[in-house]
Amino acid sequence: MHTGSCLCGAIRVEVRGDLHAPDACHCSQCRRWSGHIWASTDVPRDRLTVTGEDQIRWFQSSDRVRRGFCGTCGSVMFWDPPGRTSMAVAMGCFDRPTQTELGVHIFTADKGDYYRIDGDETPQEPAPPP
């Protein structure tokens, strides 16, 4: 069993069984939404229990996906493609130990220009002077 919550504790999650290896999404939507990269794990809906659902606020970020966050503290928590058998839960929500480690970086071609990914030798332009 893995447990976790948003920052203020208004929303709690429980996942029965092991967590899948998380991914780190570098797309522009996830970076804007989370403040950097979005690290999450896909959880089958039948293994996920959420309490405090009335505190979740949903933002329809595309025709196929909605994103859930806490209406009290603003913690970003869920990436939900309705109709799929699983949804993504933010790794930052989980209590330790998670007993998993990052599996893959995705949408790296869209990553921010202010950081590098391990092994990324792509030249970066220097930041403009202040």
Image: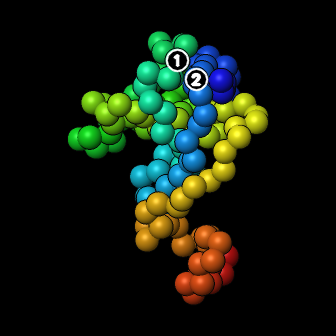
Give the labeled residue for mark 1: 49
Q: Residue type at mark 1?
A: Thr
Residue at 57% over, 47% down: 21
Residue 7 relative to residue 113: left or right: right
Q: Secondary structure at mark 1?
A: strand
Give the labeled residue for mark 2: 16
Q: Is residue 36 above or below residue 8?
A: below
Mark 1 and mark 2: Cα distance apart in space: 8 Å
Label 1 Cα neighbours within 10 Å, binned few <14 / some 14-19 / many ≥20? few
Q: Are marks 1 and 2 in contact (CB under 8 Å)?
A: yes
Q: Quadrant of residue 67?
A: top left
Residue 87 % position (x, y)? 42, 34
Label 2 Cα neighbours within 10 Å, binned few <14 / some 14-19 / many ≥20? some
User: Closer to the camera: disc 1 or disc 2?
Assistant: 2
Q: Secondary structure at mark 2?
A: loop
Residue at 43% over, 25% down: 45
